[in-house]
Amino acid sequence: MFGALLLAIVCAIGYELIRQSMASIQKFGLAFWRTEIWDPVAGQFGALPFIWGTLYSSILALVISTPIALGIAVFISELCPAGLRQPLVFLTELLAAIPSIVYGLWGIFVLVPAIRALEAATPEPLRQLPLFSGPPLGVGMLSAAAILAVMVIPFSSSVSREVLKSVPPAQREAAYALGATRFEAIRAALFYARTGIVGAVMLGFGRALGETMAVTMVIGNNPKVSLSLFAPQYTMAAVIANEFTEAADELYLAALVEIGLVLFVITLLVNSLSRLLIWWMARTAKPSMTAEPAPAAEAA
Amino acid sequence: MRSSTFDSTAALKGCATVIARLKGCATVIARLKGCATVIGLKGCATVVAAILIGVTVAAQTIQINGAGATFPNPIYSKWFDEYGKAHGNIRINYQSVGSGAGIRQIQAQTVFFGATDGPMTNEQLQQAPGKILHFPTVLGAVVPVYNIPNVTAELKFSGPVLADIFLGKVAKWNDAAIAKLNPGVTLPAIDITVVHRSDGSGTTYIWVDYLSKTSPEFLKKVGVNTAVNWPTGVGGKGNEGVSGLVRQTPGSLGYVELIYALQNKIAYGSVENMAGESVKASVQSVTAAANEAAAKMPADFRVSITNAPGKGVYPISSFTWLLLYENPKDKAQAKAMVDFMKWALSDGQKYCGDLGYAPLPESVVKLELAALAKVKTS
């Protein structure tokens, strides 16, 4: 019953997004997805820099956050003394409760100056690489990825921890019985829980894709596609939040709604892909190894 | 129909918040139940009576809703508050949702009046179901703010130089164009980091309107709107975002509203006007710009006063407008609104100075009072 309602709501959102962005869809067609121009004065709109910025920042955030989140989860569930466990769980989950505007302010006043110093200290030969080109502004892709990583960690680490907790003790005992070291036993537990961990990472990915306020405050908001970590870039959620209130003409508004539609489609794709991945992993696992279906990324 | 757009896009983000709220609600309801038992029947009766009284009072009050520009929000709030104190039966609500949203809402007639920092275009006026009138309420200015290590002197700028910097053509602080305007100041050979607004804003509108008037190349490559396609630089969200970035980034140049710079004690540069003087923005120099414009004021008040001619004029000044239908549906609200406007244009202007706005010149107020008489209140 509630499942059907949820499906209906998702369909209604999709329908409404398409309806409201009709003007832009008709004018730009599929070119909207691969045009790099965003010019409200001339009425030329393309989503490419925003798609790029969103995916790039989110993937970078996952690259930074996944090892840390996994480390936290393993430490809490496997290694940590019992007395320390609850306070640590509480502290990681507290990170999730901080409003994103607070993260953003922290980003502007603490993270960005630190990143600027780091960028300025990058040796000259490295600066020749496209990955580190451009002036050291502080605001840009690197700051955005770093702040997203911090915001994503509580989500992926909490879910990973729960998944690890649900690994039957017999698994670890069997590993020890076979003469495994502690490290090998943890590896066996991680392997057993891998579908769930992928689900946890994907949950974090969904969170990173949709994050708006903290990102827009540190990413530099410049709609240009660039590989450089130092370059100011832009994300889909950020441009909607920034420009929606002042968009007075029809086409501009429709283009912004279409950005929302693109974000909606990409989130759906990412979620479906992660589902497929989990399903495929569960299927290829040996029957004895099959973990229960993991909570997949639902956050949009 | 248009206003529902916002709901659908926000819905995604809102879901999580809603769920959290629902949980909160449940707790509140549980508490309320507890309260009811404690207060008992007597308490209940009082509550019911209070609600009934509230309803009868509300029926007599005239409530007017408006929405629009964020820039004049501080003075509008002050006005509505002061006016409400003197006229208990009139309540004016204002939502500072942005000029664009203000224009959309008055077109859709979901609010009684709108407010905007850039005048409505002809197409926008045609899309509205009735004739919309513009009324300038106060004046504001936009100032260049900068951060150059080891330079304490107050810098002087000109329109063409600012345009070239924002086009990315002048990229170093020691460029000959800047040095020429600032003899005696030693400028370092560091890159200029341009900081602009990332959100759509009336501030941006005023800034690019000025740059486009002084540089044909800027007009051609960038143009005028509340959000534009910047050739260079980084975007900060809001005045606080821009000033935050400027303060932290050595070698940066940005633009913020005069009020914001005054209230936060941010140093800002002066700008060369058409008479060739280098003028710093102040309440006087902004009102001077409006005074110059008053002589050639068009009947609908849709006028840009950036780069105004005359002596002592600060060139990056602008009116902010309130939008009213000439023939509003609700005549009681129309009457109340016109009375309020008369007050705002006369007594209300005295609040300008404290809040960092420049008051309207007498000549403009006279023209507006004449135009107000055209609004049909019966």
Image (spheres, coloured by chain):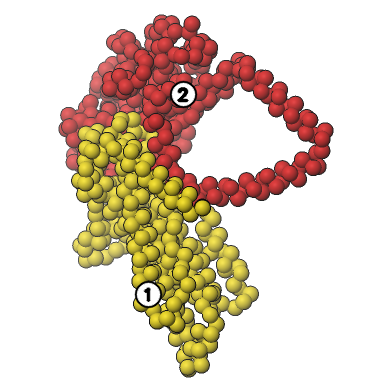
Chain colours: A yellow, B red
- Identify the residue at the far front of this view: A1
Classed neighbour count for the residue bearing mark 2: other residues with Cα under 10 Å, few (<14), some (14–19), many (≥20): many
Looking at the rendering, which quadrant does residue B371 occupy? top left
Q: Residue at x 36, y 60 (%)?
A: A272
Left or right? Give the position of A35 relative to B51.
left
Q: CA distance from mark 2 to mark 1?
A: 57 Å
Q: Closer to us: mark 2 or mark 1?
A: 1
Looking at numbered disc 2 in the image, what kind of residue is underneath it? Val
Is residue A33 positioned above or below B374 on the image? below
Residue ID for mark 1? A283
Left or right? Give the position of B369 relative to B153.
right
Residue ID for mark 2? B111
Looking at numbered disc 1 in the image, what kind of residue is underneath it? Arg
Looking at the rendering, which quadrant does residue B200 occupy? top left
Is residue B342 positioned above or below B121 on the image? above
Q: Residue at x 17, y 29 (%)?
A: B216
Looking at the rendering, which quadrant does residue B228 occupy? top left
Where's residue A250, x and y in %? 30, 31
Where's residue A182, x and y in %? 49, 86
Asked if both marks, 2 and 1, belong to the same chain, the answer given is no
Helix, strand or loop at mark 2: loop
Classed neighbour count for the residue bearing mark 1: other residues with Cα under 10 Å, few (<14), some (14–19), many (≥20): few
Kindly tell me whether residue B86 is visible in this rendering.
Answer: no
Is residue A12 positioned above or below B62 on the image? below
Is residue B308 positioned above or below A294 on the image? above
Where's residue B80, x and y in %? 54, 21
- Pointers 2 and 1 in contact (CB under 8 A)? no
Left or right? Give the position of A69 relative to A19.
right
Residue A145: which numbered mark, if any? none
Task: Please name whichever residue, B64 or A295, is drawn nearer the observer in this view of the structure.
Answer: A295
Where's residue A298, x and y in %? 44, 57
